[in-house]
Amino acid sequence: MPNFITLPCVDMREGPSRETRVVSQALFGEAIEVLKSHEKWFFIKTPDNYTGWIREGIVVRDRPCSPDLEVSRLQAHVYAKADTEFGPLFTLPFGSKLECLESDARWHQILLPDGRSAYIQRGDVEQEPFELISFSKKFLGLPYTWGGRSSFGFDCSGFVQMLYSRLGIQLPRDSRQQVHCGHAAESFILGDLIFWGHSNIDIRHVGMFLEANTFIHTSVRENKPYLRLSQLSDPEWNGSGFYAYSTARRIIHVQEAAQKRHSEIDRSDQSARV
């Protein structure tokens, strides 16, 4: 029986206690599998095959959804009424998928996973032309968040996982798993993943190459706990920093994948509800 996350973003923990470490996050509307329960906790598996514990009461069972809208802003408010003056019910992160019931010139009425109806403004779900460099830069400045998978805050592997999902590629959750994807890249092109660690078998960090010696990533190193651009020549990242340089991996020819994504957005816009 399917289960769906009803809150915008839920921390998954190592054990059934708030005193255990965060391992990842489950996101709004995701179909998750409940593997077992303990007292007031569920042990779940997310669509990327990652497991962890969440508190009960934040999933709803057997609520099918046919999403046809997606949040395109970094955060978007959801309202009980089609009126901002009453304040939002909650705020959703980028990429949250929604089922549309009706639309007018400003608002979409949506169906929430728990069966309630609500409203979101059209401008928060309008899709934009896709270009990987400009798209990735829209997240600059977001706080580094251990286990983060959303625009409320990413960790390094959660961010590149999200980027590649926009290209239609589902990467594993952790950098230690991602380093086994694709093939080794001797010189860098847009979209290549770059890995650092204590050794070649102990990967601890990943970023994505953009252009001209620049990569994008999120980290707490350099006393900069936020998503940012860095240079491969920077002392922290040229192999002499806290983490040694390990390898670069080419997952896919990004230009071709990005063009496919752009075409999909165009088709989606043409068929969107008015």
Image: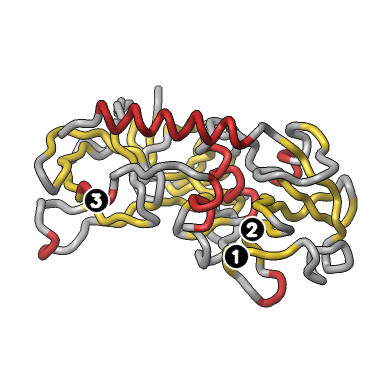
Residue tagged 1: 228
The colour scheme used to paint the residues is: secondary structure
Q: CA distance from mark 3 to mark 2?
A: 28 Å
- Left or right, 140 with respect to 107, comes to right
Q: Are marks 2 and 1 in contact (CB under 8 Å)?
A: yes
- Left or right, 186 with respect to 267, comes to right
Q: Secondary structure at mark 1?
A: strand
Under mark 1, the amino acid is: Arg
Relative to 203, say whether 224 is above or below. Answer: below
What percent of the width, then of the height, locates residue 190? 66, 45
Q: CA distance from mark 2 to mark 1?
A: 6 Å
Say which mark, if any, is on residue 123. 3
Q: Earlier in the sequence, mark 3 or mark 1?
A: 3
Q: Quadrant of residue 49?
A: top right
Under mark 2, the amino acid is: His
What percent of the width, then of the height, locates residue 33? 49, 30
Q: Secondary structure at mark 3?
A: helix
Q: Nearer the viewer, residue 228 or 14?
A: 228
Relative to 8, say whether 164 is above or below. Answer: above
